[in-house]
């Protein structure tokens, strides 16, 4: 890609992220007016906690979409992860840490199978993961057995972590300050690096505004949530995983390979990049995150049953990734797209539940938002195409 192409793609990515933020602002304003309780600190704590579960799945979907593939089985893999950890702990007395490891291992195995079949047999990701969805659903039913449901005792560490563990406010504020300082320092470093290379760089004003907004969001959000229960450890864990993957995508060779494959797998292969190895690693990460999301869901619900996970959760995760700004065509988006997209989706679900709206209304609204997101993505794709002419 030329420098002009990269600049254009960055601009398009920024435009999609701005669109996602605008969508979130509209949703919060409308729901805040129609349902004042929606913006209460107690409800927003619930939204963040639920976002952590769906967000783990969405994060995996983001990675797969970045390489130009699609995984529609994350919901089913999540359900399998829930069933595995619940049955292992309750029916077989397996220590919780080991049970969580077993659940994640199911995701690793499925992801490895997807990656190997995709790279060796060149099977389309959509068809491959459709088959995986059915396999995971079948395994979930087998693991749960005839009862079809397993309840986790409330005294288990997993349930306490998902339901009752919150970050002490001084710690949350301290981490927020460190994050703001770190992001600001990285922004200054990047600006100076581009200046030295003679490349277009972000203006000091824009950098200052961006860092200031981040500070207001993190510190203000932490203080507001602390008026209720505070920031849940589960949500903090989700943000930590997002941060690590964001750094990996932007600062490591693996991350550059992911984006290159999403731009053009054939060009990446001709350039000597390890395409197959990268594709396999992405599928493994995606399914592992989905299984871990299922573990968190089991803790949050203190149970696992036949309705945990499923195709609807897969569609929700895919919709959240698209709403968050990830391109269906691969190569564009970021790990933070998962946070933005899932915030929009969970806000809509929470607000409509407070209004007493039926599920059909939620599906209709999410469908409209998704169409808008895809239309923006398609428009960006055409503009990027014209830029290369």
Image (tube, rainbow, N blue to C red):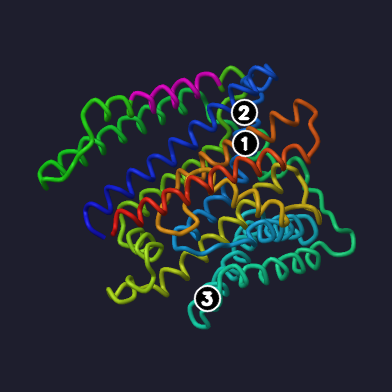
Label 2 environment density (alpha carbons within 10 Å; few <14, some 14–19, many ≥20): many
Please give the label number shown on residue 49: 1
Task: Look at the numbered discs 2 and 1 and tell me whether their residues touch, using CB distance below 8 Å.
Answer: yes
Residue drawn at the location 41% of the way across and 29% of the way down: 176
Is 139 left, or right, of 366 in this rendering?
right
Residue drawn at the location 21% of the way across and 35% of the way down: 188
Residue 55 is situated, as x and y percent measured from the top left of the image, at 57, 45
Classify the position of the N terminus by image quarter.
bottom left
Kindly state the secondary structure of the residue where label 3 is placed: helix
Nearest to the observer: residue 173 or residue 342: 342
Going from N to C along the chain, the mark reached first, 3 or 1, is 1
Residue drawn at the location 47% of the way across and 36% of the way down: 19
Cα–Cα span, label 2 and label 1? 6 Å
Cα–Cα span, label 2 and label 3? 40 Å
Residue 38 included in the magenta stretch of the image:
no
Nearest to the observer: residue 337 or residue 82: 337
Is 46 left, or right, of 226 in this rendering?
right
Going from N to C along the chain, the mark reached first, 2 or 3, is 2
Query: Label 2, on which residue?
Result: 45
- Marks 3, 1: nearer the viewer: 3
Residue drawn at the location 78% of the way across and 41% of the way down: 360
Residue 219 included in the magenta stretch of the image:
yes
Residue 245 is situated, as x and y percent measured from the top left of the image, at 42, 51
Range of residues picked out in magenta: 212-224
Task: Look at the numbered discs 3 and 1 and tell me whether their residues touch, using CB distance below 8 Å.
Answer: no
Cα–Cα span, label 3 and label 1? 34 Å
Quarter residue 73 falls in: bottom right
Query: Label 3, on which residue?
Result: 118
Kindly state the secondary structure of the residue where label 1 is placed: helix
Is 107 left, or right, of 310 in this rendering?
left
Nearest to the observer: residue 122 or residue 3: 3
């Amino acid at each position: 890609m030329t420098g002009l192409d990269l600049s254009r793609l960055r601009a398009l990515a920024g435009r999609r992220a701005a669109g996602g933020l605008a969508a979130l602002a509209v949703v919060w304003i409308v729901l805040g007016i129609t349902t004042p309780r929606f913006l209460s600190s107690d409800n927003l704590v619930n939204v963040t906690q639920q976002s952590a579960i769906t967000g783990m799945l969405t994060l995996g979907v983001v990675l797969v979409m970045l390489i130009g593939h699609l995984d529609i089985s994350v919901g089913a893999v999540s359900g399998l992860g829930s069933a595995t950890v619940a049955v292992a702990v309750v029916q077989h007395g397996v220590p919780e840490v080991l049970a969580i490891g077993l659940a994640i291992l199911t995701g690793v195995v499925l992801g490895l199978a997807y990656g190997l079949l995709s790279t060796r047999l060149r099977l389309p990701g959509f068809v491959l993961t459709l088959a995986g969805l059915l396999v995971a659903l079948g395994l979930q039913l087998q693991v749960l057995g005839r009862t079809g449901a397993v309840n986790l005792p409330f005294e288990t560490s997993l349930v306490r972590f998902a339901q009752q563990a919150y970050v002490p406010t001084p710690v949350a504020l301290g981490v927020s300050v460190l994050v703001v300082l770190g992001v600001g320092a990285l922004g200054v470093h990047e600006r100076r690096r581009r200046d030295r290379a003679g490349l277009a760089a972000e203006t000091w004003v824009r950098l200052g505004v961006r860092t200031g907004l981040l500070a207001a969001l993190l510190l203000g959000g932490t203080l507001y949530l602390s008026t209720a229960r505070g920031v849940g450890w589960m949500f903090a864990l989700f943000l930590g995983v997002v941060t690590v993957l964001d750094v990996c995508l932007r600062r490591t060779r693996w991350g550059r390979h992911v984006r290159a494959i999403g731009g053009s797998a054939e060009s990446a292969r001709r350039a000597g990049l390890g395409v197959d190895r990268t594709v396999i690693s992405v599928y493994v990460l995606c399914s592992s995150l989905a299984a871990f999301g299922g573990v968190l869901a089991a803790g949050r619900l203190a149970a696992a049953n036949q309705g945990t996970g499923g195709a609807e959760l897969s569609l929700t995760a895919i919709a959240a990734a698209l709403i968050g700004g990830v391109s269906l065509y691969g190569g564009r988006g970021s790990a933070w797209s998962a946070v933005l997209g899932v915030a929009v989706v969970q806000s809509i679900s929470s607000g409509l539940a407070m209004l007493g709206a039926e599920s059909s209304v939620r599906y209709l609204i999410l469908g409209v938002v998704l169409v808008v997101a895809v239309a923006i993505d398609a428009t960006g794709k055409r503009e990027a195409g014209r830029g290369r002419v």
